[in-house]
Amino acid sequence: GAGSDLANVSTRAVRDGDIYRIEGQKIWTSMGAIADWCFVLARSEPGSKGRSGLSFLLVDMRQPGIDVRSIRQMTGDEEFAEVFFDGAVAQVRDRVGAEGEGWQVAMALLGFERGISTLAQQMHFRTELDEIIAAAVANGCSRDPLIRQRIARAHSGLAVMRVNALRMLASETPGPEALTYKLYWSRWHSDLGELAMDVLGQAAEVYDADGRPGALTNMHLMSRADTIYAGTDQIQRNLIAERGLGLPREARG
Ligand SMILES: Cc1cc2nc3c(=O)[nH]c(=O)nc-3n(C[C@H](O)[C@H](O)[C@H](O)COP(=O)(O)OP(=O)(O)OC[C@H]3O[C@@H](n4cnc5c(N)ncnc54)[C@H](O)[C@@H]3O)c2cc1C
């Protein structure tokens, strides 16, 4: 795996006629334990470096060459997995794009993942905010001027998100709006999680008999990951600077 430095990917795919054999591993694969298929960005050109020589492969996960190990997270769920590829087979016909040009495919995919694919979650965010407001009214927190300000800020932040979403929908391919959108919603949602905890107070720490947190506590715990997956906040800022504003590329060691 390569984390933020995706171009440094070391998982290899060796061509053998109509198939590739994949060797490598990837941690934090969302839904890895239940997925039937995954996509893999692997180095298919031996000796290549950086963004060139990578291929984007669709891989059947139900095969002997793949070992999936679930990771238990602090919410109690096991949503992620570490996936090991030990001679796993991908069909050449299941490659997306040309051989060695997987980087372009991955970047296009990430553009959608960071932007337009997340639009529906705004409705979910609205429901979460409404639950927080209801809790604040019920426990009297809504009379606290600082809590009221934070609720108002969350409400207006959601309105800003909606306007940005409309801008994204107006363009055919992910543009600069998508760059700022991920950074914006991930910060907004992390703040919402903290607001939920401050509104609920000690009640947030009451888990059910199965050791599971309530919905808002679960949301808060999950929101800690929002600023990491699909590119961390720091990486988003680099992208905004380089691709959105045309500033010089960051120094790389
Ligand atoms: C909930 C969740 C789901 C995920 N799902 C998937 C998945 O389905 N598939 C998958 O492949 N991956 C998945 N990931 C992995 C995710 O993409 C990586 O965690 C993320 O890209 C960061 O990589 P890293 O963890 O290796 O951290 P690192 O890259 O080691 O970064 C560590 C810290 O250094 C900072 N940093 C790194 N490089 C720079 C730089 N150039 N400039 C400034 N700061 C920098 C980062 O911002 C971060 O704060 C998931 C992660 C999470 C949390």
Image (cartoon, rainbow, N blue to C red):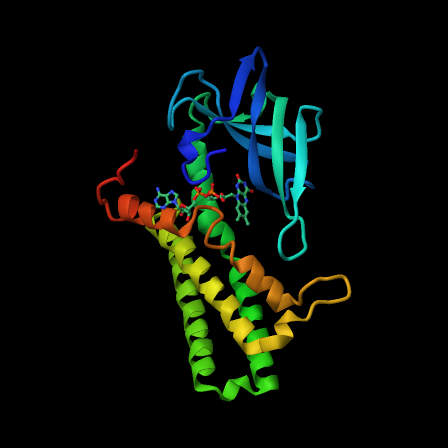
Q: Nearer the viewer, residue 154 or 58?
A: 154
Q: 26 above or below 152?
A: above
> Considering only vertical position in the picture, is 91 above or below 31?
above
Image x and y of residue 164, in percent: 39, 60
Which residue lies most toward the top here? 17
89 up-or-down from 200: above or below:
above
The image quarter in which residue 91 lies: top right
| Quarter the C terminus occupies | top left
42 displayed left or right of 77: left
As drawn, 150 above or below 100: below
* Residue 11: percent from left, percent from top: 51, 26
Instruction: Judge whether residue 35 can be spotted in this image.
Output: no
Judge whether residue 40 can be spotted in this image. Answer: yes
Left or right side of 212 for 102? left
Q: How many marks?
A: 0
**Quarter-of-image position of residue 204:** bottom right
**Residue 137 rendering spot, x and y as whole percentages:** 57, 85
Q: Residue at x 45, y 42 (%)?
A: 110
- Residue farthest to the right, as pictured: 209
Residue drawn at x 33%, y 45% is 239
Q: Position of residue 31 (x, y in %)?
A: 64, 44
Identify the residue at image location x=37%, y=50%.
234
Of 20 and 95, the residue lying toward us = 20
Pick the residue in front: 224 or 153: 224
The residue sitting at 76% across, 61% down in the picture is 210
